[in-house]
Amino acid sequence: MAKPSRRQFESGLEFVIESLIKLSGFSAIFFVFGIFFFVFREGAGFLFDGLNLKEFLTSTEWYPTSVSHKRYGVFALIAGTGSITVTAMLIAVPFGLGAAIFISEFCGPKMKETFKIVIELLAAIPSVVWGFVGLTVMNQLIIALFDVPIGLTVLNGSIILALMSVPIIVSIGEDALKAVPDSYREAAVALGATRWQIVYRVLLPAAKNGLLAAVLLGIGRAIGETMAVLMATGHAVKIPTSLFDSVRTLTATIAAELGEAPVNSDHYQVLFIIGILLFTITFVVNLLSDLIVKGIREK
Amino acid sequence: MHHNSKLMVLCTLVLAISGCGKKSDSGETAQSEKHIIQNSGSDTMVNLAQAWAEEYAKIDPTVSVEVSGGGSGTGIAALINGTVDIANCSRAIEPEEAETARQNGHDPQEYVVGYDALAVYVHKDNPLNEITIEQLAEIYGEGGSITKWSQLGIQHTAGCSNDEIIRVSRQSNSGTYHYFREALLGKTRDFKLGSRDLHGSKDVVELISKTPCAIGYSGMGYAIPEAKTIKVSKKAGEPFYAPSIETTLSGAYPIARPLYMYSSGKPTEHTQKYLDWILSDVGQKIVEHSGYVPLPADKRITQKEVGE
């Protein structure tokens, strides 16, 4: 009597759990499309009727609240986001991958634990705090070091962003290196390879997919970050010509202006169109990375 | 700071919802229950509104005033959507905004509750002491010709070796930004792009105090010793005035503006009492303590219809 009912109960439970897991999986897709749908819906009216798309993408004139002549050109904002992201990655990738290699291959177990805790701590600092550091400490430091009129610049924002992406790159990069089987290392040692040769010739090629994923997640972090760059870059609509120019990013513009744009006004809709633009950029980045990873795999 | 205000908006929303629920349950007759006045809007006025609310809680414990910031535009938007009883606004309501509010059944009633003088700040090491509105317009306006401190006739060498004027401004939806633009450039001209647009009145002064080349504007109540307030004149040849209560009330200081509160429709009994108290001597004393300019007795007019 007891046996069949228990079996029934277990298979029922199995079904429930399976459905729940399935639901969680599908919910991710549902939410992504839901968000995209709502962002698109808010911006669509002006996107198809009224917005000059060419001017939107190529003009540097961002005058959303002008009384006489409203102009919505986001080219300077795209340049701002681009310059900050590229510079931040130039700083963060060498440091992040270097730290990952050191932690995974070169340091002892005790030091490794310490490093991991400290790096996790770095990841736990809220972005407003980073922005505050940029606005106060880094601003004065850059003025004093480089003798420039203002420290809220591309350099400032990039350093802050680099510090924010390094923990991501380190922890994912380290996982990728750890996933390389020890037999590879043993084989290399048996062949008389030095430690650097092991890293350079064996580990990096073996872990390249994971390392690439680490870098791309870092880039994603840099493009999407809002608060810190809003405070550290000076928030000035301008195409940067050097590391010491102030810029404004796409995300910071949405954050600063959406709260006060009258609902459903042109300005409000343009901010959502910027959201669509950001979606497109991240989508392209992800797609490219997928293609690159696939390409590497096929080799 | 931004996160903070978001949190506050959230809190007020939650309170608003719970407040509404109570009203419909038991009507407004219950004496023991707290009457909640929702009040949001201008960042310039948020400290002042907070000070009023705290003081008023001591006088009338049955009324609780919930204050949040976000900006003048946010306050008006909330008024239009019917989620506040009073919107704070550091600029006059736009005719279109008033019209939309009216269509939604929240006919805004205007109260002038004080004045704010916008001070022009420079770094404390800057030798500049006075400036004209025309010069400010050339510095800030689109197509303006002044980009160097030497064009103002000063040698600004302390920490600003390349002579460049760093313009500090506000985000484009702030009431302060709108008022300053209109005072300098009139209704049609725009600001020059490339200014550092900060997100709060206090941040502007903070940044200027740390940036020798900078110039910027913010309420006179935000003055700190590390930033210098300079005198302003309407035109070259006319006398320069520092922002103060006297120069604002006499009209001598050129960049001062009224601060408004808009009630949503005819104020209820409690809201009306609150507004009357704000316009009383006690309420106006708080205006002065918060660094703004109180209304003289003969200027304390109770509400008027917008657009009449």
Image (tube, rainbow, N blue to C red):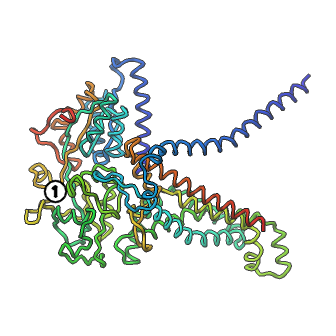
Depicted A144 relative to depicted A163: above or below:
below
Depicted B105 relative to depicted A61: above or below:
above
Position of residue B183 in the picture relative to residue A187 (left or right): left
Q: Chain of mark 1?
A: B
| Mark 1 surroundings within 10 Å by alpha-carbon count, few (fewer than 14), some (14 through 19), many (20 or more) | many
Three-letter residue code for mark 1? Pro
Image quarter where the C terminus of chain A lies is bottom right
Residue drawn where x is 33% and y is 26% of the image = B35
Residue drawn where x is 38% and y is 58% of the image = A62
Q: How many marks?
A: 1
**x%, y% of residue A252?**
44, 56
Image quarter where the N terminus of chain A lies is top right
Q: Quadrant of residue B157?
A: bottom left
Q: Quadrant of residue A210?
A: bottom right
**x%, y% of residue B94?**
27, 42
**x%, y% of residue B128?**
19, 70
Position of residue A71 in the picture relative to residue B141 (left or right): right
Mark 1 secondary-structure assignment? loop
Depicted A52 relative to depicted B164: above or below:
above
Residue drawn where x is 36% and y is 75% of the image = A148
> Which residue was labeled with disc 1?
B243
**x%, y% of residue A194?**
77, 81
Residue B308 in view here: yes
Residue drawn where x is 36% and y is 70% of the image = A150
Residue A118 in view here: no
